[in-house]
Image (cartoon, rainbow, N blue to C red):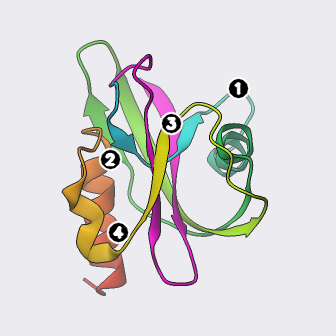
């Protein structure tokens, strides 16, 4: 199993940042919460801050965490560890993805998400609704 972090980056309008995978990546053109694999001797929080800087060129502040999700794809099992965060500084520059969107909460489940991300999004919706 591979430990992977992901960020629910929230803006001042309470929209969530989503990225679309490129056609050459695994799960081509699926939408995902940005993040990446935890490296040796790295905490999940350190990983997420590093990955967001590497992938989309911004700095974030982690606000809270959500329950993780274990998902098995045909070739890999991942433990997806989500964190709610805010955009501190930097201009968004996609380095691996082909597109991004800021989504209102009522739009969150409308995209063609990577399967591992869907339970995370549902946890987030429950979180913000106080469930």
Q: Residue at x 68, y 28 (%)?
A: 39
Vertical relation: 97 (above or below) 105: above
Cα–Cα span, label 4 and label 2: 11 Å
**Label 1 with label 3: CB-CB less than 8 Å:** no
Tell me if 78 is positioned left or right of 53 in this view: left
User: Which mark, by number, is residue 119?
Assistant: none
Percent coordinates x, y for residue 122 in the rendering: 25, 63
Query: How far apart are labels 1 and 2 at the CA level?
Result: 23 Å
Does the magenta segment cover residue 115? no
The answer to which of marks 2 and 3 sits earlier in the sequence is 3
Task: Name which of mark 4 and mark 3 comes first in the sequence.
Answer: 3
Q: Nearer the N terminus, badge 4 or badge 2?
A: 2
Q: How far is the residue under mark 4 from the one under mark 3?
A: 17 Å
- Height in image: 27 above or below 21? above
- Residue at 29% across, 85% down: 129
Q: Circle 3 sits on which residue?
A: 4
Camera-side mark, 4 or 1: 4
Report helix, strand or loop for mark 4: helix
Q: Is residue 11 magenta?
A: yes
First to last magenta residue range: 1-27
Q: Residue at label 4?
A: 124
Q: Which residue is mark 1?
A: 40
Q: Position of residue 63 (x, y in %)?
A: 61, 73
Residue labelled with disc 2:
117
Which structural element holds mark 1?
loop
Residue at image x 58%, y 30%? Answer: 96
Q: Residue at x 33, y 25 (%)?
A: 27
């Amino acid at each position: 199993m591979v430990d992977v972090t992901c960020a629910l980056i929230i803006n001042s309008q309470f929209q969530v940042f989503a990225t679309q995978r490129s056609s050459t990546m695994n799960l081509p053109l699926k939408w995902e919460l940005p993040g990446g694999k935890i490296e040796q001797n790295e905490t999940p929080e350190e990983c997420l801050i590093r990955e967001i800087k590497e992938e989309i060129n911004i700095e974030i502040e982690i606000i809270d965490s959500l329950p993780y999700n274990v998902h098995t794809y045909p070739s890999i099992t991942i433990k997806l560890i989500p964190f709610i965060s805010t955009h501190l500084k930097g201009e968004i520059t996609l380095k691996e993805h082909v597109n991004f969107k800021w989504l209102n909460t009522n739009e969150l489940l409308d995209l063609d998400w990577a399967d591992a991300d869907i339970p995370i999004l549902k946890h987030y919706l429950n979180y913000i609704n106080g469930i």
